[in-house]
Amino acid sequence: MDTSVGDVRQRAVALIQEAGTLLGMIPHLLDRTEELQSAGDAATKEAENSRKEIVALRSEVQQLRAERDDMAEQLTVIMNDVLRLSSEAVAKLRPSEKRSAFWRDVHPAPAPAPAPAPAAAPPAESAAHRASAAAAWRREG
């Protein structure tokens, strides 16, 4: 039994030493807990500030989108006015359909083809008439 009392005593000493080590760790653990709690509080404050900033930025984005839409509408109106005005300017600058008394066609339209001669043409057809018909035929060809 002596050995069992010695074993119990030895185990009690080991437990007391382990308890001393654990008791020594308690102040360190308390300090670490305070540090982590402070870091958690700081993260919570930062998250709240970020949420507020996000709300403000979303509002600003919404306002900028509305402004962009207004500008797009205004630009569309302006571009339509520019298009209308440029069309009117082109119409005014285009030469009028009235021609001056001095106007002449540089490339006259070809003379109409002579009517085909009847099969039984009278022999009195003049040489001048034949020459003018031949000239007209050459202009067409």
Image (cartoon, grey):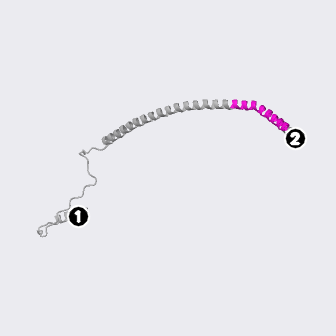
Under circle 1, the secondary element is helix
Give me the disc on residue 3: 2
Specify the segment rendered in magenta.
8-35
Q: At which x and y percent is residue 62?
A: 47, 33
Q: At which x and y percent is residue 71?
A: 43, 35
User: In screen coordinates, is 76 left or right of 43?
Assistant: left
Give me the disc on residue 137: 1
On screen, residue 135 above or below 10: below
Q: At which x and y percent is residue 22?
A: 77, 34
User: In screen coordinates, is 78 left or right of 7?
Assistant: left
Viewer-nearest residue: 51 or 114: 51
Viewer-nearest residue: 124 or 92: 92
Reply yes or no: does residue 15 show up in magenta: yes
Reply yes or no: does residue 124 show up in magenta: no
- Mark 2 burial class by Cα count in 10 Å: few <14, some 14-19, many 20+: few
Viewer-nearest residue: 54 or 10: 10
Q: Which SS type dominates the magenta stretch?
A: helix
Which callout, 2 or 1, points at the residue further toward the start of the chain? 2
- The answer to whether marks 2 and 1 mark residues whose Cβ atoms lie closer than 8 Å is no
Q: Choose top left, top right, bottom left or bottom right for residue 17.
A: top right
Disc 1 marks which amino acid?
Trp
